[in-house]
Amino acid sequence: MKETALMPPARRGSRTTTGRKTARPSAATPTPTDEEGTELTRRTTIYLKKETWKSMKLMTIETGESVSAYIERLIDKDVKRVQKKLLQNPKTL
């Protein structure tokens, strides 16, 4: 029979919370919205080269546009370009 390792017992006082509810409920964080008031409900992580991030961040500071708005605008533009291409020639992809 194979032996399994047992978890060590929990140390007393190692909890960071008391386990009791607070008297006042915490406020819910509002859902972020864009300039038109559309709810922004999807998040993702992207990995960029340091140079790309720095260039993009400086550009958005100069234009006053947020990085999220900039990325979404680029994606929307590219999606529309691909959709147009597909409508013209469905076999291109």
Image (cartoon, rainbow, N blue to C red):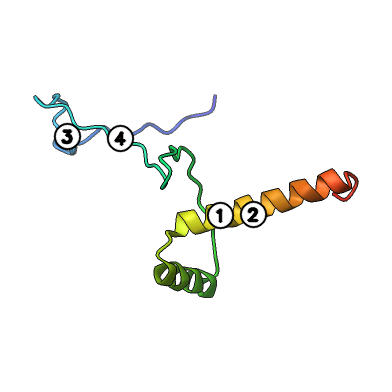
Drawn side of residue 88 relative to residue 68, left or right? right
Residue annotated with mark 4: 8
Mark 3 or 1: the one toward you = 1
Viewer-nearest of discs 2 and 3: 2
Q: From what the image shows, is residue 82 above or below residue 11?
A: below
Tell me whether circle 3 and circle 4 mark residues in contact (CB < 8 Å): no
N-terminal of the two: label 2 or label 3?
3
Identify residue for label 2: 77
Q: Quadrant of the N terminus?
A: top right
- Of tags 3 and 4, the one toward the viewer is 3
Asked if the residue at tag 2 contacts the one at tag 4, i.e. Cβ–Cβ closer than 8 Å, the answer is no
Residue in the picture at 77% in, 48% down:
84
Q: Which residue position holds label 3?
A: 17
- The reply to whether dot 3 and dot 1 touch (C-beta < 8 Å) is no
Q: Position of residue 58 (x, y in %)?
A: 43, 73
**Where does label 1 land, which residue?**
73
Amino acid type of the residue that numbered disc 2 sits on in the rendered structure: Lys
The amino acid type, in three-letter code, at marker 1 is: Arg
